[in-house]
Structure formats: structure tokens, C-alpha cells
Amino acid sequence: MKKIFFIFLFLLIGITTSGCNNNNDDLWDNLGGGGVGDQTDESNVDLDKLPSNDEIENNKNNNFQVDEDGTTEINLDTLSTSTLTLSEGGTYILEGNFLGNVVVEGDAEEIIVILKNANIKPSDSQAFPAITFKKHSGTRVLHIYENSINYLADSVGDTNEADEGNAVIQAKKSSLTINGTGTLNINSYGEETTGIKIKNDLIIDGPTINIDVNDNGIKAGELIALYNANLNIKADNDAIKTDVEATNSEEGNEYTTNPFAGYIYIKNCNISIVCGDDGISANSLLKIDNTNDFTINVTTNNGAPNTITEYSSDNADGKAIRTCGITLVDEETGDETDLLSQTDDNYLLIILGGNFIINSNDDAISSKGNLFINDGIFDLSSGDDAIHAEYLTAIYNGNIKINKCYEGIEGASVEIYNGEINLTSTDDGVNAANGDLIGYNYNIFFGGGNIFIDAGGDGIDSNGTVEITGGNITIWGPTRNDNAALDADKGILVNGGTLVACGPAGMVETPSTNSKQCSIVYNVRNYISVGEQITITDKNNNVIYSTTAKKQFQSLVISLDEFKLNETYTITIGSNSEKITLSKTTNQIGNTFGPGGPGGPGGPRP
């Protein structure tokens, strides 16, 4: 986070002493970090308390074997009508080619439609979906027969029936289960046609579904549950979305206290998405329960731009995986407001595992509430934030590679307990901020993991506290002096682990003096070049840390669990060596210089 310029002036004029002490009147402490840092307030997320999907598992009603005895077989090639209507309860097997549409209606307790190498497309004069399931009170199943290949499309005309919108498969004011192990291909020809549009709940279990449409890929009004499926979606708009809208505050309150209103659940699915807007978008809860053998590959709105700036990130569009809140529509003005969940834990986006390959124009992973990542393999490129939550971002494990983004990992609070994280950002690397919240205890907590940050802005930036109790954190921060490798409004407590932060010397922030682990702050006038070797040895000349400079820098902040109070250490950078005895918690070698100090880029600023 950028500081106002008078801090630069005080740094330039006031800091001339070497080292830090525990005196809070010291200019270094007051203006360059240090001081007495506040304790963070990490959440200690309990996985057992996260929202359960048992209700969905118990009601998916799709673990059955197709019994062809007693079924009605229909050879579509022989039909003379342009509309096939199925209204009696039972099981129907559709096979062959049909230039027409299928309508499933009536209140039969159960109607199962089996597609067995069926090709269905209405004529251009019909202007209908391929299959319509009308309002019903029973069970409706579309089964994709084993090893069969099926094709469905809409007509060129407008299939908008009763303002329901165009679709290839449509369930009006009802729910639908699509299962089986065959292949279903869905294409659109009409204007703004959605592939699968369901008014209530949609469950997909098992099939391969290929969707190529000019509006949304899959859209449900209440819930989407995906199991063991292979989905390939090309959509001009959103790929997979729930669409829950409230028309008044009472209805909005009902929806926001129910985490399953606008819920998407994904378990062991391979999903490939190329879309014009959002990839996977849920109103309330989005839970991905894949193992790492299953891949979700998402590209939105042509992916992240080659050059990412603050302007481009502000104007980005197309989040890859997101929760967006319940939409409240003002009946008089038509204005829309996003209502946030009111559930106790507020975990709106939960990723328990999976392999994620994301190239998004806007955020790669984004939650309107809390965000929890328990495991997974992530390869992320984003035109805005790579991982973002409005409230808490909690990462318990995972292998996360962020190739490019504007900001890397963001939340009002960020907690990282383990994992391998390697991120490159145009602006801040890990950021705790949210300007819309009042009185929030912003914090960043590191409890473990290997974290590598290459940031064009602040490496770690908290509008509140930072606490490090474990892990290995390496920061190659900005090269200009309007940002810093470390930045925290309420102090940086280093109580364990390894912290190495390299950046410019104009805005250096040091660990707090009440940290439990000693730190060394090493500052030089001229920038140290890329490729220089950095080595720290103890009094017995044992190497306790070594690395190579990945970016030019003026300031090195380093804290190792090997550091002991009153012990002497040697820092060698290139051919230059300095000895320092750790006489206090935070120890300094050299001075800090203002923006663009001697040898630095940019020079003095007005």
C-alpha cells in the first residue's frame, strides 16, 4: 500500500542512526515499522464446521440402473409429428434423428427420458428448445445411455417461451437430473441461447457433456450439483451459474440465511471452460470437492492481458470461479444490489482439492464472503486478483502458482497455514484490505508453508497486523521507492519461521520490537544487482542462509529461527561482508534513504 510522501521526507531527514532498539520514541520504530506490533486474530478454521453437502447427497436420486424392461422405445426416424409429447409416467428410450422438439409434461410421479444415439433439433419454423420439461411435482431424469453419442440443438428462431429465455434443454419451474455415462453434445443456433436452463435444481451425474452456445452454458435458478462428469463448455456469456434473485428485502433475508440458495457443488468432475464472462458463478455457496486427479480449466474473456495495470484491473471482466451474493432487484427502478450471506461461518467459497488451470480477465478465484482452500494444484493467471475474498482468505494447503496478476492473494484477512505458493504480481503480493468494511481487524497470518513473492507493489501489505509463526517466506519486492517489501499499519510480529524481504530503501518497514525472533535490516546506498550471492554465516562460519538476488534491491530484512540474541553473524553480499551482533530484537546495518536515494531509480520526487 502506498504511503503519503511526507513519510519519505522524515525517512530522508530523520534516520541516521544504525540499528533499532525497544524505545518506541526511536524514529526508526515510529516511521519505518518496528515499534510494538499488535497480535493478529487468526480464525483457526475448523474444517468440520464448514457447510455440509449431506442434504444434497441424500436427495440426488440418481444412483439407479436403467432397467429396459417395461420401457417404451421410440424410433425418432419414424415420427411424422414435429413435437413428441411424453406425459405418462415411465421410462422412454429415444433413438434416431428427429427434426422437431420433445416436451415432457404432466404430474406423473416419475418420467425418465433415455437418449440412445439420439439427434434432436427443432425446425427453424418451430422456435422451440430441443427438450422442454414443463412444471411438475415428480421426478424428471434425462439419462445419457452408456457409450451413446447424442446431439441436441435449438432452432434458429426465438425460443423464448413465457419470458423463460432461450435454451436447448429447459426445465420450466421444475428440477432435473441428467445422468448416465454416454456423451451429450449441445449447440445453439438461436439468439442468446443457454445450453441447459433449469428453473429450480439441476443435478448432473456421470455423463460427458459438450456445450457450445451463444449465451450461458448451464444455468439454474436455485442449485447445481455436479458429480463424476466431464463438461466441456464454450459460452459467449457465463459458463456455469446459479441465478437467484430476490424482489424484496424479506425474500432477500430468506435467501441470504440459506447457504443452499444459489449453491454449486462439484465433486470429482473434469471441467473445461472458455467463456466471455464468468466461468463458475454461484450466488451463495460454491464448494469444489475434487481430488487432484480432476482438472478444472477455465479461460474467461480472452484471459489475462499481456500488460496488467491498475486501470486494466479496474476494468477487467470475467471472473473464473466466484461467489457473487444474492441479487436484490428493486421492482420500481430495476436497480440491482448484491446481498451477502448471513450464515454464521460465511464460508461462501470452499475448495477441498483439485487441479485448477485458470486464465481469467478478472479475478481467478473470488468470494463475496470467506474463502477456504484446503488443498489443490493451482496454475493461475489473472488480469486482477488471483485469489480474493471480501472477508477472510484462508489457505491450509496446496500447490499454488500465480503466473501474473494485479494483486496476488487478498482478503480483509489472509491466513496461510501451509502449502507451496509462488506468486508474481504487478501490485501487492499478499494484501489485507477492504475499504468497504468499517472497524474490521485486518490481518495477515503465516503459520507455515513455502511462500515466494515477486511483487511490483508491496510484497506483504496489511491495513492491520502481520504475524509470522512459521514457514519460509521470501519476498522480492518493488524496485521503486513508492512501495516496500513489507508494509503493515499495526506492526509485523515475527515469532518463528524464515522471513527474507528485499526491496528499495525508501520505505523500509521492519519487524516489531516485541517479536519473539530476531531480525536484521541491511540497507545500502546503491542498488545490489540481480545475480549477486547473499550468504549469512554464524560465528563458527557455518552457512545458515544463502540465496541469489532475483531482483535489484537496496534493503534486506531477514529473520531466521537460527538467530540468537547476542550472537554475531556475517552477511556477505557479493564481495562485501558485514558483521553484526544481535544486541536487540531488530538490528540494523546501514541507513535508509528517501525515494530514489543515491544510486536508486527514479531520483527525488517533487
Image: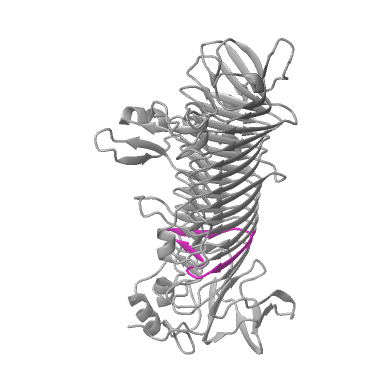
Mostly what secondary structure, the magenta segment? strand
Closer to us: 120 or 43: 120
User: Which contiguous range is marked in magenta?
Assistant: 450-472
Q: Residue at x 36, y 31 (%)?
A: 246
The x and y percentages for residue 460 are 51, 64
- In the rendered image, residue 225 lying in the magenta stretch gets the answer no
* Above-or-below relation of 156 to 39: above
* Above-or-below relation of 444 to 282: below
Asked if residue 345 shows in the view, the reply is: no
Q: Residue at x 42, y 40 (%)?
A: 325
Task: Look at the image and tell me in which quarter the N terminus lies.
Answer: bottom left
Q: Residue at x 47, y 75 (%)?
A: 508
| Residue 342 relative to residue 230: left or right | left
| Residue 439 relative to residue 462: left or right | left
The x and y percentages for residue 566 are 61, 75
Number of labelled discs?
0
Q: Farthest left residue?
A: 332
Closer to us: 542 or 245: 245
Closer to us: 602 or 62: 62
* Above-or-below relation of 264 to 414: above
| Residue 446 relative to residue 134: left or right | right
Q: Residue at x 42, y 56 (%)?
A: 433
The x and y percentages for residue 176 are 56, 24
The x and y percentages for residue 166 are 46, 33
* Above-or-below relation of 456 to 430: below
| Residue 20 relative to residue 451: left or right | left
Asked if residue 573 shows in the view, the reply is: yes
Task: Look at the image and tell me in which quarter the C terminus lies.
Answer: bottom left
What color scheme is it?
Answer: one colour
